[in-house]
Amino acid sequence: MGMKSDTEHLSRDEVAGVLAEALPFMQRYAGQTVVIKYGGHAMVDAALAEQFCADVVQLKLSGIHPVIVHGGGPQIGRMLEKLGIASRFEDGLRITCAQTVEVAEMVLSGSVNKQVVNCIRKVGGKAAGISGKDAGLCTARKLQRKKTDPVSGIEKIIDLGYVGEPVAMDTEIIDVLARSDVIPVVAPIAVSEDGETLNINADTFAGALAGALKAKRLLLLTDVMGVLDADGNLLSELTPEEVERLIADGVISGGMIPKVRSCVEVVNSGVEGVIILDGRVPHAVLLELFTARGVGTRISLGQAPARGQEEA
């Protein structure tokens, strides 16, 4: 009955060692808020999804306040295709028309959100599914991007439609849930001051929410190991200054540049550490929070204890 324990193949001494190593970290995070952006392979792989939900329930039982913000881009894409709504892209960004944002809200706040809530229930926890619209959690404005014509050098504004960026967070509903035994599961849908529904990138939403909550950690589950050096090795610790140096040197490139710069903004907003970690690794969340080694790249101001030197 239930999931098989991952410690069944270990001796009693080895199990005791695992628990003893985790205890100081549980004490360190007790009563603290941890925001987790959940998406990618970890969400669509059934076994990983169930493990993730069980790990989040473990955090809650350990006295930590986990808050999940989930994505759902592939699920939105499949539904748009099913409904025969064509997607238009500009510079790799989906232009979100009124029809598309309606589908995005239906998928994110509806099916995806409730799948996560139900999975948490299945493994013995309690969760409440909400979106940025609920209790005025997130007020947003339309996001605009600028593009420079490579030939003329003229800059133009790209209208992304109903894509938003957070401008204000009212965390009262999260605070109320955190004081209970219920885990908040948040869909990144918000409303503008004019009452328009806006779809927000899940990383961006999670970062803004973590900053507003003054969370201890923001974990960004991705489909990569983390930030890699020029030889392909994982960089476990980075400061904002090191991030900019690696970008200038070309070590951090492509789509990782906006991700790490977003992490730096979150750290500057008061979150002690932002971790980019591989959601494909079983129990990635527990390994990151409850072991000395961690499994991803932590971006911080460099004032937190280094990996392996954290104290309770």
Image (cartoon, rainbow, N blue to C red):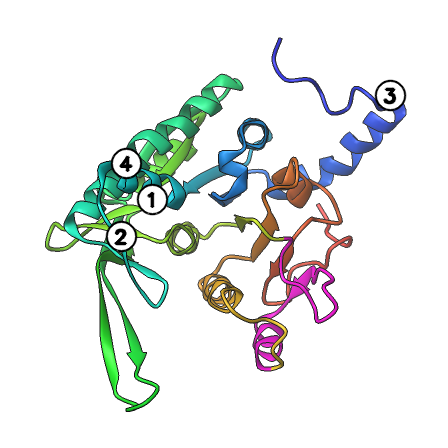
Q: Is residue 22 visible?
A: yes
**Distance of label 4 from label 3 (alpha carbons):** 52 Å
Circle 2/circle 1 CB separation < 8 Å: yes
N-terminal-most mark, 3 or 2: 3
Q: Residue 45, which numbered label?
A: none
Disc 3 to disc 2, C-alpha distance: 55 Å
Q: Which of the two labelled residues, at mark 1 and mark 4, occupies the earlier sequence position?
A: 1
Q: Secondary structure at mark 3?
A: helix
Tell me which amino acid carries mark 4: Lys
Amino acid type of the residue tagged 1 in the rendering = Gly
**Residue that badge 1 annotates:** 77
Q: Are marks 1 and 3 in contact (CB under 8 Å)?
A: no
Q: Do labels 4 and 3 touch, CB within 8 Å?
A: no
- The circle on residue 12 is 3
Circle 2: is it few (<14), some (14-19), or many (20+) Cα within 10 Å? few
Q: For the point 75% across and 47% down, which residue is it?
A: 292
Furthest residue toward left: 194
